[in-house]
Amino acid sequence: MSTTITQTTSKNELVKWINETFKLTITQLETLGTGSTFCQIFEYLYPNSIQGNKIIWKANKENDYIKNFKTLADAFTKNNIQKQLDIQQLSKAKYQDILDLAQFLKSKFDKQTEKRENYDPIEFRKVEERKVFTPTNRKTVSTLKDKTNNENTTTSTHSLLVKRPLSKTSTWKTTKPTFTKTPELNSITEIINNAEDDEATKVKKIKSLFI
């Protein structure tokens, strides 16, 4: 008798149940046509029946919806759930098919004697954020590997390139070229031929010509 009552659960009641239990904000049942929420509901009813990383949480095309419903159908089979799923109709978000499946799972939920008290629906969905991103889709660099000491160093993208500003007091020093004075040959000859000077005096005079 309880099954009959839950099978006629209204659309609004189903939306309220899903939002409160799984911390969502859906307004229409057709939103469940992506299949991801149905997978989460089933995993709640049958713990560990579906791994979070098998669900395409950000599904935005029909091919992804179909994959989610196939994952759900496999879980039905493994847990001996005697219900056929029309994957094509569900992936097209056909209202009657979505409503029927939502009512079916709600009836399972109502029959569940023990609720999962420590269950965190948001944490379960965060598996999408924990996936390892490849360099092609990584937008920011969070950690850099220090090859010298094998330590992980957290570095922001702004500190990757450091431009050292020039000091205001620093100036370019230029070296002036030095020129050697070359005396004229006639001056040297005159000093040498000067009979009045001794040798030491002649040497001093010649050296002075080069200064």
Image: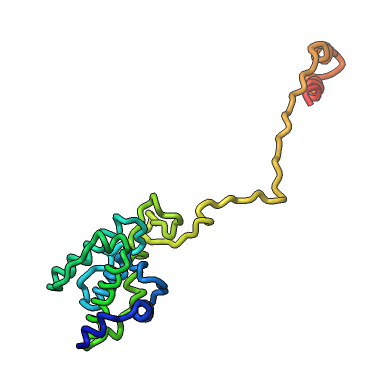
Q: Residue at point 60% right, 51% down?
A: 164
Say how the picture is coloured.
rainbow
Q: Residue at point 32% right, 65% down?
A: 33
- Which residue occupies the extreme right position in the image? 196
Q: Is residue 28 left or right of residue 159?
A: left
Q: In which quarter of the view is residue 31 placed?
A: bottom left
Q: Is residue 67 visible?
A: no
* Position in image of residue 44 (x %, y %): 26, 77
Relative height, residue 62 to residue 28 (above, below): above
Q: Residue at point 24% right, 74% down?
A: 42
Q: Is residue 162 left or right of residue 126?
A: right
* Position in image of residue 194 (x %, y %): 85, 13
* Position in image of residue 197 (x %, y %): 84, 18
Q: Is residue 167 visible?
A: yes
Considering depth in this image, is 14 or 127 the residue closer to the camera?
14
Q: In which quarter of the view is residue 210 placed?
A: top right
* Quadrant of the frame with the N terminus: bottom left
